[in-house]
Amino acid sequence: MNRMYQIVILTALFSVSCVQGKRVVYQDENVVVRAKNPAFYPFNVHGDQTIYLDVGGKRYRNVRGIAPYYLKINGDGILFVTDKAGGGITFHVVNGKSKSHISIDGDGSIFGINIGAPRSHGTRDTDYLEEIAPERIAAVTRSRGTKQVSILNLQEKTLERIEMYYYSPDGVVTNRSVYVKGKRVE
């Protein structure tokens, strides 16, 4: 009989862990962000929660970063990043007024993991926007000894190029590489 109770309790725990809903983890005037735990949580030690971002009447899955999960663009727009199922990322730019959306394939870019990081822009392990123009955005990732600049062309909806800068321990640029469509051109 004791064995039967154990089976019932384990079945109940697994059932409850599988049907957990999405909980709101961040909300402001621009977005609502929800998180959902992996199946068999908390027993699934290798699983990670899935982050969903709702903006402009649409829901996006596998959002990168931490709260607020996006960066502001010129006061009324936002930029956020999602992971693609097979690897790689997608940049999303949403106009706050019109709710229009642009998605840009970001393969080769590492941008987005540190969106919302509580560190000053330009310091180690930060993601920020360095240049914002009507037709282009420079999305920057700083990490130890490197700086990656992903140039987004908003008119053509493409990742125009990726510039990599390598730094010495004292902060001097020691090397620079430029990639277009995944191929090194400089």
Image: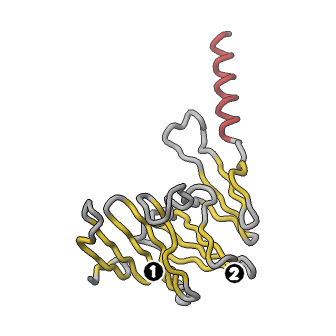
Depicted 42 relative to depicted 21: above or below = above
Secondary structure state at the residue bearing disc 2? loop
Q: Which residue is mark 1?
A: 151
Q: Residue at left 25%, top 64%? A: 168
Q: Residue 160, image x and y in percent?
A: 43, 84
* Contact check, label 2 and label 1, Cβ < 8 Å: no
Q: CA distance from mark 2 to mark 1?
A: 20 Å
Q: Residue 151, image x and y in percent?
A: 45, 80
Which residue is more in the foreground, 60 or 176? 176
Crowd rating for badge 1 (residues with CA inside 10 Å; few <14, some 14–19, many 20+):
many
Classify the position of the N terminus by image quarter.
top right
Question: For the residue marked with disc 1, what is the amino acid?
Answer: Ile
- The quarter of the picture where residue 61 lies is bottom right
Q: Which residue is mark 2?
A: 100
- The quarter of the picture where residue 26 lies is bottom right
Depicted 64 relative to depicted 14: above or below = below
